Amino acid sequence: MLPDSTTVIHNYRALYKAALAACQYSSPSRYCVRDKLRKAFRKSDPNRFSQQRIDNTIEFLRTAARRKGMEHYIIKNLCMVEYWQQHSRNNRKLVVGKSNIPVTEQVFSSYLETLGLLNQSMDLELR
């Protein structure tokens, strides 16, 4: 069942508000959070919508905002990786080994795999 537009808007606002509180409104992080949420809500498949996963993500973000524990460090690192991925000053491609795959692609593929496993184990929707 597809969600109606009111539900989508309420979830977007709740996620955005919780994410801003989790990153403590810091300058580079709040823009990364905004861009990631926009991209997720504009380009993701509506059939993939899961209210339970969104509720778990909101609760995770609220916990990250309340205390400086593991959740806070996860959100902080996600924002910094996103920032440096988008605003990398060094655009050269370093290729190591016989595979001819750039090192940055290898690193980010393992990063995305780890993030996917975190999402799967905790039933979250972090990207």
Image: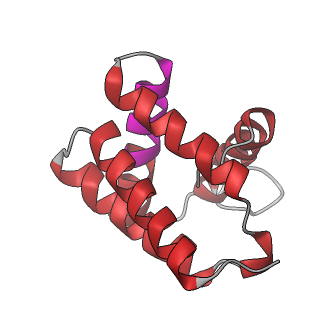
Q: Quadrant location of the N terminus?
A: bottom right
Q: Main secondary structure of the magenta part?
A: helix
| Residue 70 versus residue 35 in the image, above or below | above
| Residue 23 versus residue 46 in the image, above or below | above
* Residue drawn at point x = 55 percent, y = 84 percent: 5
| Residue 67 versus residue 74 in the image, above or below | above
77 or 101: which is nearer to us?
Answer: 77
Residue 33 is situated, as x and y percent measured from the top left of the image, at 37, 57
Can residue 31 be seen here? The reply is yes
Residue 43 is situated, as x and y percent measured from the top left of the image, at 60, 82
Q: Quadrant location of the C terminus?
A: bottom right
* Residue drawn at point x = 74 percent, y = 60 percent: 50
* Magenta segment includes 31: no
Residue 65 is situated, as x and y percent measured from the top left of the image, at 34, 30
The magenta-colored residue range is 70-79
| Residue 122 versus residue 13 in the image, above or below | above
Check the image and name the residue furthest to the left.
Answer: 27
- Asked which quadrant contains residue 24, the reply is top left
* Residue drawn at point x = 65 percent, y = 44 percent: 111
